[in-house]
Image (cartoon, rainbow, N blue to C red):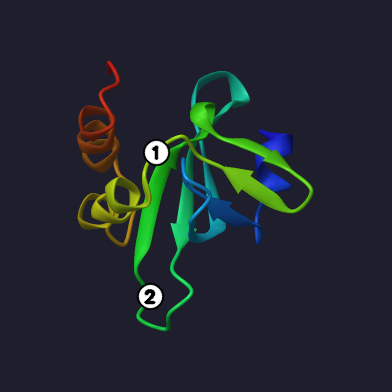
Amino acid sequence: MEEARSWIGWRVDDLNGITIGQVEEVIPGEGDRAAWLVLGDFCLDGRRFAVPAADAVGGTGRVWSPHLRRQVRDSGALAGESFTQQVEAHLRAYYGRAA
């Protein structure tokens, strides 16, 4: 969790090295482990996306996610304004993870 929190403000790149956004928030999971990275868009429209923290790797000011930019950006419809249990369930299903 501590490592993931150090990524706040870092740019996030997708599987192909294309920038998705930047880490705005880290959502904790069980056992003080990071569950989700909430990313903000660089535009001023306030869109937010979520990626599984367990899939992400960070270093030298950047985070890499093995998910394609389009897939991550499509998660924005699920991430919404607040992170509830229902939102997390939808995101788990979206990224193909068991509850």
Determine the residue located farthest toward the right in the rendered image. Answer: 60
Where does label 2 land, which residue?
A: 46
At a point 53% along the width and 49% down the height, the residue shown is 17
Inter-mark Cα distance, 2 to 1: 21 Å
Give residue 74's position: percent from left, percent from top. Answer: 24, 53
Mark 2: few/some/many CA within 10 Å (<14, 14-19, 20+): few
Residue 33 against residue 80 in the figure, above or below: above
6 to 66, vertically: above or below = below
Q: Mark 1 highlights which residue?
A: 67
Above-or-below relation of 52 to 84 = above
Tag 2 secondary structure: loop
Residue located at (49% from left, 55% from top):
18
From the image, which quarter does the N terminus lie in?
top right
- Locate residue 86: give its quadrant: top left
Q: Please tell me which residue is depicted at 50% across the width and 39% down the height of the picture.
A: 65
Q: Which mark is residue 97?
A: none
**Comes first in the chain, label 2 or label 1:** 2
Q: Please identify the quarter of the rendering in which residue 10 is found.
A: bottom right
Q: Amino acid at mark 1?
A: His
The residue lying toward the viewer, choosing from 74 and 26, is 74
Horizontal placement of 66 versus 78: left or right? Answer: right
Place residue 67 in its image quadrant: top left
